[in-house]
Image: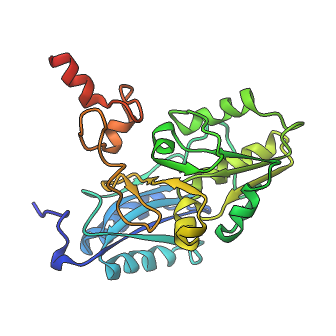
Amino acid sequence: MTDHHASSGGGVYDVAAFYKFVSIDDCDAWAPDLKQRMLDRDVMGTILLAHEGINGTISGTPEAVAEILRIIRQHDGLGDLSHKVSHAPGHVFNRAKVKVKPSLINLGPDVDPSQCVGTYVKPGDWNELISDPEVVLIDTRNDYEVHAGTFEGAIDPKIKRFRDLPGFVERTLDPRKHKKVAMFCTGGIRCEKSTAWMLEQGFEEVYHLEGGILKYFEDVPREQSMWSGDCYVFDERVGVDQDLNPSDEAKFCPGCGHALTTKLRCAPEYVPGQRCPKCAEGQAAG
């Protein structure tokens, strides 16, 4: 078996994240072909296809990643697909996967971001928006993601799953009182659905960070940043810092020192900043 964690030649690999809500009618036929194209070029990662669009993160040499993105953009409706790039010493995924799903991201309520969505805010304008005292700033990510880092002044909904977000909003916010709401997530896709749903609930002004946290890191100089900590990512880097380099601080459990994989962070025994399932195993053994 090839060790995909050691980059061939010691070069830097690209990690590209992308999504787009657009009607895709041939998911089942396209998925195996796209996976084979990835395998042919030693590109690893996961791409989700659904009737409502595409969502993925892939890693490989810059040339190989660029070629896969070019292939994806040849598909109907994806010519203007945008992506965000960070870097790693080698592959950050173990396999190449292309999955067909009923939806790209499950909020719970059925919403269509292609029909109605919040106001996009460029990373360069984000600081001014969230500095407005009338703006309620909500981190739409899961609790273990928020623990790694978030924007100054952001509300942590303390949710385990994205589909728990509507319940938090219903318990906490009132469209008659909270006139301006800003939302953000890692790459932007969760905010497409959450802001669409918020508008349906009667909130008047709903904003979201275009391109998500990763685009903010890319565009906003560190000395101007209003972000604190690292950004959790769903691959073997676990976190990236504000220079989009793999983070050391987000990788290990403070309780036992074990590497905090996505699987461990999603387990019910995981308590951010305190313990992970490996800690629980050690306590049981003791």
Residue 219 at what x, y percent from top left? 57, 73
Comparing 224 with 22, the one in front is 224
Residue 130 at what x, y percent from top left? 72, 55
Residue 83 at what x, y percent from top left? 51, 71
Tell me which corner region of the image, top left, top right, bottom left or bottom right, holds residue 80: bottom right
x 80%, y 43%: residue: 200
Comparing 41 with 26, the one in front is 41
Tell me which corner region of the image, top left, top right, bottom left or bottom right, holds residue 197: top right
Quadrant location of the N terminus?
A: bottom left
x 40%, y 30%: residue: 271
Residue 96 at what x, y percent from top left? 29, 60
Tell me which corner region of the image, top left, top right, bottom left or bottom right, holds residue 31: bottom left
Q: Is residue 194 above or below residue 42?
A: above
Q: Residue furthest right?
A: 176
x 16%, y 79%: residue: 9
Q: How many marks?
A: 0
x 42%, y 53%: residue: 233
Residue 44 left/right relative to 207: left
Res 175 seen here = yes
Res 82 seen here = no
Quadrant location of the C terminus?
A: top left
Residue 106 left/right relative to 174: left
Comparing 197 with 75, the one in front is 197
Q: Residue furthest bottom?
A: 63
Residue 177 left/right relative to 261: right
Q: Is residue 241 above or below residue 13?
A: above
Q: Residue furthest front?
A: 223
